[in-house]
Each structure stands twice: as structure tokens, then as C-alpha cells.
Amino acid sequence: MRWALEEVGQHYKVRYLSQGSQKAPPHRAIQPFGQVPTYEEDGLTLFESGAIVLHIAERHGKLLPVEPNARARAIEWMFAALNTVEPPITDHARATLFEADKPWSKPRLPAVRARIDERLGELADRLGPNEWLDGEFSAGDLLMIAVLRILDGTDMLESYPALAAYVARGTARPAFKKALADQLAGFTGSPPPQFAEWLERMKAATAETQGDAQ
């Protein structure tokens, strides 16, 4: 959401929540599932990242093409990022972080990895040598790159050079750099230990999956 706001040049203020408070009644009144982020503007409250980014793009006339068909395709890629590419990546994060100690976690990792590879391969084939998914950089690229960044620090993305270069182009944009810097500057204290361990678990699980396949 920060990235989208930086891309359109919109000033914004951030209200941070302490860990756990997103599950409390006051926040659930605006986000029924107790999650973040939420977005408030002139009496409008939105949740879900895709809905927020789409609103920002439409509200400010940027990040979406003007031509109707191109606009529809950009929105299509927004849905693809969140509904097709992200779910198996989220499954991998869940299995290597939140459910890492469960007996069913390790046995399902090869299947999860296979689904990720299938989606990444399909996406890489569609992107090909192009700079962005469909013409100019759009909200579809913004969300797709945000999803792919979940794989940072693993070899999964690097196995697809076209996608690695695609993410590098997106994260080199000034708007992304400013959004990330401001986001990191807003965090204080130490994160929960499980999050510090997550990346190492992802790397280890990836190595184990590759070893089983050899």
C-alpha cells in the first residue's frame, strides 16, 4: 500500500498497531478478519491489499492504463498475483514458520514447492523478455512483485532469471525504495523470534526438498 501511494505521489500518514491489537474489537470494527493493512480516506475505510491498491490507482489516475482493454488486463494481473501466484507461496511460509513443528509440515513441503515452481515457470514464460507484464508498469506489476518478494532469500526465485530481474527492476523504482525505507524506519523493538527464524527455515526446507528430488 505504501508503494502504491508513493507511485501516485500521494501524501499519507501511518498509524501503527502494537502486535495483537489487530485482533481486538476496535480494529475488527474496520477489518473483520483482524488483519493489516487498512486504509482510511475521507470517510472511506478499506481492507485487503488488492482492493486498497485498486482504489489508489483509480482515485489518482495512475498505475492503470487509460485504454479500456489494457486497463482490464492490468487489473487481471492484480487478481493473478493475489489469487494464483501468492497462495502456494503463502503455503510454503505457513509450513516453514507457523506450522514448522507440526508432523504434517515437512511431508507436504515437496508438493508445496512443486506448486510454486509450476506457477513461477508459467509466470516466467508469460513475462518472457518483457520489462513488465503488459506494457507500462502498472498496479498488476506492483502487486506481483510484492508477492514474489516473499521468496527473497531463497533459491526459488533465482531459479527463474527473468523473474529475478523483473523483481529487481520493480524494487529499483524510487517509489519502492522510499516506501521500504519508511516502512523499516517505523519498526521499533525486536520482532518475535519466530520471524527471525523464518528465513533460515525456508532455506533449510528448500535444500531438503531439492535433496529429496535428486
Image (cartoon, rainbow, N blue to C red):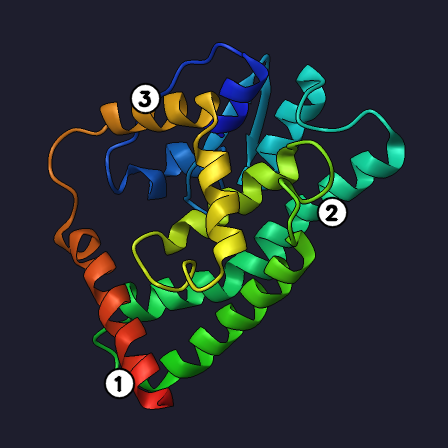
- Residue at label 3? 182
Q: Residues within 10 Å of mark 2 (few under 14, many from 20)?
A: few
Measure the alpha-carbon separation of dots 1 and 2. 37 Å
Q: Is residue 195 visible?
A: yes
- Residue at label 2? 76
Closer to the eye: label 1 or 2: 2
Q: Residue 26: image x %, image y %? A: 39, 32
Q: Is residue 186 visible?
A: no
Closer to the eye: label 1 or 3: 3
Instruction: Give SS at disc 3.
Output: helix
> Between 204 and 197, which is closer to the camera in this rendering?
204
Q: Residue 211: image x %, image y %? A: 29, 85
Identify the mark nearer the N-term, 2 or 3.
Answer: 2
Q: In the picture provided, is 106 more to the left or to the right than 158? A: left
> Between 26 and 201, which is closer to the camera in this rendering?
201
- Residue at label 1? 103
Q: Residue 43, relative to residue 154: is it above or below?
A: above
